[in-house]
Amino acid sequence: MDFEERFGQVLRSYGAGTLGERRHLLRSLKAPELANLLEATPPRVRSYIWDLIDEEISGQVLQHLGDDVLNEVVEGMNTAQLVAAADDLDVDDQADLLQQLPDAIAAQVLNSMDSADRQRVEMVLSYPEDSAGGLMDTDVVTVRPRHALEIVLRYLRLRRELPRHTDALIVVNSRNEYVGTLSLSRILTSDASVTVREVMDANSTAVPVDMPDWEVAAIFSDEDLVSAPVLDRDGKLVGRITIDDVVDVIAEDADEAVLARAGLDPDEDTFAPVLRSARRRAVWLGINLVTAFLAAAVINVFEATIAKVVALAVLLPVVASMGGIAGTQTLTLVIRGIVLGHINRANLLYLLNREFLVAILNGLLWASLVALAAGLAFRDPTLGAVIAIALVINLLVAVVSGSLLPSILNRLSIDPAIAGGVILTTITDVTGFFVFLSLAAWAYA
């Protein structure tokens, strides 16, 4: 039975069946699926489902919830329940959970931990959430270069359990300075009498503690890493990042890139109260209204020309739409390139020249077709020529804007994924309307 079928069964069990049957259904779901189930149900049903979830898995469910739903669930929990939920999580996951909680509640949970756990979590919390330090887990297994593999094997057997996603042990010297990594496969396949130094990888990748999370994700992707040591500025080991944390970063960035263009928060509750959702969306609707008035003001300037040639009003959306699509294509390409590290100051000019040539070719192609269609439809060759020239100019302006906007917005500390689309649409609409109507006013003067 797949997740959708079990999801339907859980919803149908609301208000029906025995308590045991309902719990059995929920136990068949994993923590991420339970979190998805909570986010996919209205608040009343959500409360009913949360009360049936086993305490042993509640912490893992909490860490997969968005901020809105998490805050709603946490409001019904006391400090003891939150401490118990966080107790089964890794240090990095505990830190992630505390960062999502309201400050007062997070402080209570932190103070309720024992001193050792609190110290480890506070260390992770001391770094920015979107950095390698904010992603790392301090639970690492280290060995010294001088030790024989036989001693390492004996040590591992005494531990009985390794941290999750352990594919290699981290080699450090007596000052806790990073030396290299020792893969588990080398331990198992090498002579037990050789030392760690002889079989370790001294060139394995380590990441600085202050590296942005998107750069960490790029390194993991490029080098197919399962885990990587995290080092402070002195080259000392402070923790380890694993692939599960990197996957979360990639998923969050993808959600943000898609939703931010519409002015939506990736952590917003799908079933949030009406007033809260309306308040959040009102900001971007207001910004869009301002840009729409700018475009309307341009059209109003040429009111006499439009009254003279009514066909201009019919064709205005064509000019604006073509520019908007061309600009959005370039903008999306550039933002993706910046995130992946493919675009920088050194090659931005090359990209701009390439996009300019692409715009000329596409502009000439589609302008010719639109000119022919407009000329035949309205029996006016002049109108066809005017819209053709306007289309080419607007496409060129669109791709130049789409190429340069992300870099400009980044310098202004504005997220291009959020603001880029709104600004680009304004530029292409205003430019398209102004050029088209100006040419028409000149041609029909």
Image: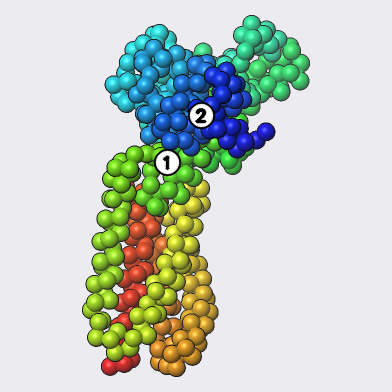
Residue 202: name its quadrant. Answer: top right
Left or right placement of residue 38 versus residue 223 in this view: left
Kindly identify the residue that appears in the image at 46 percent across and 25 percent down. 48
Kindly identify the residue that appears in the image at 34 percent across and 21 percent down. 106
Secondary element at tag 1: loop
- Residue corresponding to mark 2: 14
Q: Residue 184 in the image: x percent, y percent? A: 68, 21
Left or right placement of residue 107 versus residue 58 in this view: left
Q: Residue 37 in the image: x percent, y percent? A: 51, 33
Residue 181: name its quadrant. Answer: top right
Vertical order, 168 against 5 (above or below):
above
Gap between marks 2 and 1, in whole Å? 20 Å
Visible in this render: residue 208?
A: no
Kindly identify the residue that appears in the image at 26 percent across and 67 percent down. 294
Vertical order, 51 against 412 (above or below):
above
Please state which of the two labelled residues, at mark 2 or mark 1, is closer to the viewer: 2
Secondary element at tag 2: loop
- Residue corresponding to mark 1: 270
Which of the image's four quarters has the C terminus?
A: bottom left
| Mark 2 or mark 1: whose residue is earlier in sequence | 2
Instruction: Between residue 269 and residue 226, name the one nearer to us.
Output: 269
Q: Residue 89 in the image: x percent, y percent? A: 49, 19
Amino acid type for the residue under numbered disc 2 = Tyr
Q: Which mark is residue 44?
A: none
Mark 1 closeness class: few <14, some 14–19, many ≥20 residues within 10 Å: some
Kindly identify the residue that appears in the image at 49 percent across and 90 percent down. 376
Vertical order, 100 against 344 (above or below):
above
Residue 117: name its quadrant. Answer: top left
Which of the image's four quarters has the N terminus?
A: top right
Amino acid type for the residue under numbered disc 1 = Thr
What colour scheme has been applied to the protein in the rendered image?
rainbow
Q: Residue 279 in the image: x percent, y percent? A: 28, 45
